[in-house]
Image (spheres, rainbow, N blue to C red):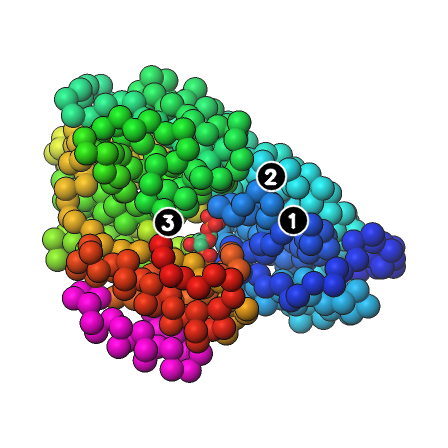
């Protein structure tokens, strides 16, 4: 750092607020927006250091995704569009929490420990969601970037997956030019139109989808993608920004509450979907003629994609290894279906896209989805090369060639940098149309075990620590034994608890065979957590 940079940081208006320690959680920092200015400033500084270290553009996304409008958050995006390397999360946490007097020496320590060459010019790519607090916080982040002489490329209000895509493509463009949103929409839209071909399907599948956009940035993106897919699919957007962000709507609400979002049609068997506040999660749902709600969550999207890819691989005779990655929140019935019916290997990793993404790269084609609707499909570079080469192989049969070119279209249509609700909608719609399935046929592949997801408020959520891909609780001592005793009383019972990395709560998940037992089971485990972890607020007594 040169003297004027040091002076600028020392004189910065963004002084540390006297708040509790804040952690770089599941997807960056998240908290009430009014306590975050100094954190954003410091993440601006850190993004410049990371960018110099990697000799590449780094992304900063300003969003608190599914959290309420009053929260905000920030995360760093690495050069290939992936989440920040896990070893740097601790560095980010230390930098966010250090007192103002220690800031310069901590920056020197990061520079020296990592051998960062400070003279290199760098650019930080920024995006933000629609939160009202974002412009103010954006200024703080930009001040941090400029204090260390970084350049800023601000894409304004965009979805989180768009930011990931822009970082990745900007870093791989041969001429180093900035990628554009237009290239994103064209890539997805063209893949979607090509894979459809000329065939018309009009029996059970209807090319008409209703999407709850959580009153977030995804509403714009859905309207924009419509222009690139013509009338192949009509996307009717509701909760498109006139109401409060994520309030009684959006993918998290629909998944956790298992009910229709605000302003939703309740016409039987209409295919509906919800995305979240920054458009990186997707769930589908419908109500039947008894007005019963049916949810098609991330597990369902993963299995649908797996069925389709497995068929295409068989038709194409390409020798590529397919695998699926889930977390402990995946319904046991979905895991059973993948292993025993589809006969595809499945891995379980801790919650957080970074863990799923890393594991999925181990397969030639890796499908990863969290039950909450966050996921995508990854194709290894070597797999893409094989697919491309096979397209020019004159020895192949027509059906082999057709299957291979469809796989290639999928490569285009899917945002491989991170789970992307817009790209995932195109994937689901492609498969339903190809199979001529209504949402009911999709649901019939397997039957979910009854399950419940609860939140418990405690004094300090950090008292709950876990291991074994979040499936076993290490502390508080004795809690896991009591959970095990409870599980043993329920047929096909499974339960686990963990502290959220995005909200100040402990999450409780249970599933079992009997629908009439699941609420009681969930309350028993929630009460154990409440007692062992010093619960605060109302005791979980009813659902
Ligand atoms: C983020 C992460 C997801 C994670 C979710 C909930 O999603 O990207 O991987 O599943 O938080 O995490 P937790 O249970 O730790 O609160 P989003 O959509 O909120 O950015």
Q: Give the mark, 1 or 3, whose residue is nearer the N terminus.
A: 1
- Report the span colored magenta: 465-493
Q: Give the mark, 3 or 2, whose residue is nearer the N terminus.
A: 2
Query: In the drawing, what numbered circle is on residue 256?
Result: 3
Residue at 47 percent of width and 73 percent of height? 533
Q: How far, Cα to Cα, is label 1 from label 2?
A: 10 Å
Residue at 31 percent of width and 31 percent of height? 272
**Left or right: where does residue 240 sit relative to residue 200?**
right
Is 227 magenta? The answer is: no
Q: Is residue 56 visible?
A: no
Residue at 82 percent of width and 68 percent of height? 101
**How busy is the neighbourhood of tag 2: few (under 14 within 10 Å), some, or many (20 plus)?**
many
Mark whose residue sits in front, 1 or 3: 3
* Quarter that holds the N terminus: bottom right
Indicate the position of residue 399 as horizontal and vertical percent values: 13, 33
Indicate the position of residue 159 as horizontal and vertical percent values: 51, 38
Query: In the drawing, what numbered circle is on residue 131?
Result: 2
Q: Give the mark, 1 or 2, whose residue is nearer the N terminus.
A: 1
Q: Which residue is mark 1?
A: 33
Q: Which quarter of the picture shows residue 512?
A: bottom left
Indicate the position of residue 187 as horizontal and vertical percent values: 41, 31
The local secondary structure at tag 2 comes to: loop
Q: Are marks 1 and 2 in contact (CB under 8 Å)?
A: yes
The local secondary structure at tag 1 comes to: helix
The local secondary structure at tag 3 comes to: helix
């Amino acid at each position: 750092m040169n003297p004027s940079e040091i002076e600028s940081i020392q004189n910065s208006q963004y002084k540390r607020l006297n708040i509790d320690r804040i952690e770089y959680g599941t997807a960056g920092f998240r908290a009430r927006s009014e306590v975050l200015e100094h954190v954003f400033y410091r993440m601006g500084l850190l993004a410049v250091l990371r960018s110099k270290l990697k000799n590449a553009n780094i992304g900063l996304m300003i969003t608190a995704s599914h959290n309420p409008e009053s929260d905000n958050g920030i995360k760093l995006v690495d050069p290939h569009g992936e989440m920040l390397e896990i070893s740097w999360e601790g560095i980010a946490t230390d930098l966010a929490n250090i007192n103002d007097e220690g800031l310069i020496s901590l920056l020197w320590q990061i520079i020296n420990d990592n051998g960062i060459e400070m003279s290199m010019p760098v650019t930080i790519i920024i995006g933000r969601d629609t939160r009202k607090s974002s412009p103010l916080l954006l200024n703080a982040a930009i001040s941090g970037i400029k204090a260390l002489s970084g350049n800023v490329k601000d894409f304004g209000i965009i979805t989180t997956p768009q930011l990931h895509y822009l970082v990745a493509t900007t870093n791989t463009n041969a001429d180093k030019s900035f990628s554009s949103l237009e290239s994103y929409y064209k890539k997805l839209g063209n893949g979607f139109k090509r894979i459809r071909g000329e065939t018309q399907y009009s029996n059970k599948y209807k090319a008409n989808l209703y999407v709850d956009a959580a009153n977030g940035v995804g509403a714009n993106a859905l309207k924009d993608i419509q222009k690139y897919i013509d009338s192949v699919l009509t996307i009717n957007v509701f909760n498109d920004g006139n109401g409060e962000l994520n309030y009684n709507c959006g993918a998290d609400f629909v998944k956790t509450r298992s009910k229709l979002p605000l302003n939703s049609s309740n016409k039987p068997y209409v295919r509906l979907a919800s995305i979240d506040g920054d458009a990186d999660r997707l769930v589908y749902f419908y109500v039947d003629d008894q007005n019963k709600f049916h949810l098609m969550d991330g597990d369902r999207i993963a299995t649908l994609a797996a069925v389709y890819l497995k068929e295409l691989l068989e038709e194409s005779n390409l020798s590529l290894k397919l695998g699926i990655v889930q977390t402990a929140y995946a319904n046991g019935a979905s895991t059973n279906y993948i292993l025993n019916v589809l006969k595809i290997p499945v891995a379980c990793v801790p919650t957080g896209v970074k863990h799923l993404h890393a594991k999925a790269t181990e397969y030639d084609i890796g499908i990863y989805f969290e039950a909450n609707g966050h996921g995508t499909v990854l194709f290894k570079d070597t797999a893409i090369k094989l697919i491309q080469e096979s397209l020019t192989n004159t020895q192949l049969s027509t059906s082999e060639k057709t299957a291979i070119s469809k796989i290639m279209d999928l490569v285009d249509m899917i945002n491989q940098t991170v789970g992307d609700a817009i790209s995932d909608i195109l994937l689901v719609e492609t498969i339903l149309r190809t199979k001529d399935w209504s949402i009911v046929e999709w649901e019939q592949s397997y039957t979910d075990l009854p399950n419940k997801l609860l939140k418990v408020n405690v004094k300090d959520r950090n008292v709950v620590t876990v291991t074994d891909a979040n499936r076993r609780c290490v502390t508080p001592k004795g809690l896991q034994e009591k959970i095990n005793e409870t599980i043993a009383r329920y047929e096909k019972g499974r339960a686990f608890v963990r502290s959220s990395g995005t909200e100040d709560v402990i999450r409780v998940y249970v599933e079992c065979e009997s629908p009439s037992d699941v609420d009681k089971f969930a309350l028993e485990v929630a009460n154990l957590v409440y007692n062992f972890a010093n619960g605060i607020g109302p005791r979980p007594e009813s659902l």
